[in-house]
Amino acid sequence: MNHDNLMLHARRVFPVLLFFLIAVGLYDPTFQQTMEIDEPWEAGCIAIAGLGLALRLFAAGSQPSRRTDAPRMHPAMCLPMLPGNALVWFGLALFPRSWPTALACGAVGVLICGRLLARLPLAPGDGTGQARRRWFPPCGAFSWRAALLHEGGPIFGTMLAFALLEVAGDLIIGEPFHVDPAWMLLVAVASLPWVGSRFASLAHAHAPAPAWATRAPSAATPCWWESPLALLLAGVFLLVWDASGADMAMAHLAGDHNGFPWRESWLATSVLHDGLRAVAWGGVAWVMLALAWPTGLLRSLTRAERVWLLGTLVLSTLLVSAMKHWSLTSCPWDLAEFGGIAQHVSHWHWGMADGGAGHCFPGGHASGGFAFIAGAFALQRARPRAAHAWVAGALMLGLTMGLAQQWRGAHFMSHTLWSAWLCWGCAQLSAAAFLEPMRRRTSRC
């Protein structure tokens, strides 16, 4: 292995080793003895890492110099990237509040930076015969788009590392496994540039259009439900909803300390619960029969697409059912505020019982409607207008089923919204993993 390949391999391995070293620092007794300054210390560590990310953004967004004697590399990369990386790792190393860990990470960082500085290209000398390393100032205006596209991965990775250290630290000191919504919101927001860069890369890929895309001219344009960025933004909105306390506010609209008046009503139970569940099961039976005898819109799909649709319907409902089975979150009608015995605990405090029956998050009933979002992915190429109507119908059916349960006291609104998000995400991942490759293989035959 030559020297350049060895340096490239080292730059890939060292971050993993450094993160492992930082995680080991969580076992330092100092971490458990200083929990009273937990939040201010975490904010300071994130601020230090944020300053490092800002230097990296400056380097990535600066325009290359047009000087003829400048080295053939991004000019701002020569210096700002190195202190930027150092500050990011320094913020992470301080997180466990273990000085041996911080010193060890600092020593490793100095060695890495020294080797990288030694590899910087030499600029021409000043006539004395002595070559010297120089930094040429950037030329042109700063580009936020270029900076975010280039640095989306480091920003997301840094905030995800902080969140993982926080969860690991809580487990080490004996707290039950849970993820604070504030950390989830931070990671979700930090992931936006990375998702945007991935989406931009896909949008600019020059892959030949498959044959099935010519069935409808408008089908070549991706729809909103196919966008990972739209899915991520919806997840950020749901995290904000969870943190706002809107669940309890909506629950108090439907019930009080005496319970929920609609809990046993004929309209809510026989029509909106049992009736709509029968409609959902009827839709599944229709898709199942369409494997051999397609009718209506399903006639425009190939047999493989109909098989995918049925499989994704089942997968979506199983995903929600599995999470519901393992959840310790109780229904609103079990809470003391509404005449029950349980205490309200966020559904993100996984592993923490609230004293009730549990098994209420996310909304299983509403998933019977939201699972049909998968039909829009199957129809979007052959029948784009029908696909828009299909996804609107699936969302309307799921929301109606969820609101019915909300008014009965069986679920919070967030249970319904997260059920929709899970079904949407499951359909999007399934389409990317199975539906699109299957269509590409078919187009080559």
Image: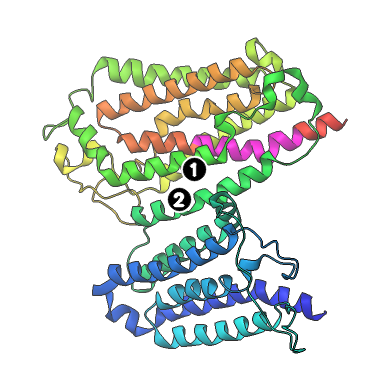
Q: Residue at x 71, y 35 (%)?
A: 436
Residue 297, position as x, y percentages in the image:
64, 13
Placement of the N terminus among the 4 image quadrants: bottom right
Q: Is residue 274 above or below residue 341?
A: above
The way the protein has been coloured in the rendering is rainbow
Residue 188 lies in the magenta stretch: no
To which residue does mark 1 refer? 232
- Answer with mark 1 or mark 2, whichever residue precedes in sequence: 2
**Magenta-tinted stretch:** 423-438
Q: Is residue 134 visible?
A: yes
Tag 1: residue type?
Leu
Viewed as shown, does residue 337 lie left or right of 36? left
**As drawn, is 117 to the left or to the right of 324?**
right
Residue 376 sits above or below residue 425 on the image: above
Are circles 1 and 2 on residues that touch, CB within 8 Å?
yes
The amino acid type of the residue labelled 2 equals Ala
Q: Secondary structure at mark 1?
A: helix
> Whole-percent x and y of residue 43?
33, 67
Foreground of the two, 414 or 267: 414
| Predominant SS of the magenta segment | helix
- Say which mark, if any, is on residue 188: 2
The C terminus - image quarter: top right
Residue 19 picture location, percent across and down: 53, 74
- Magenta stretch: residue 431 in it? yes
| Tag 2 secondary structure | helix
**Residue closest to the eye, 343 or 300:** 300
Indicate the position of residue 413 as horizontal and vertical percent values: 32, 34
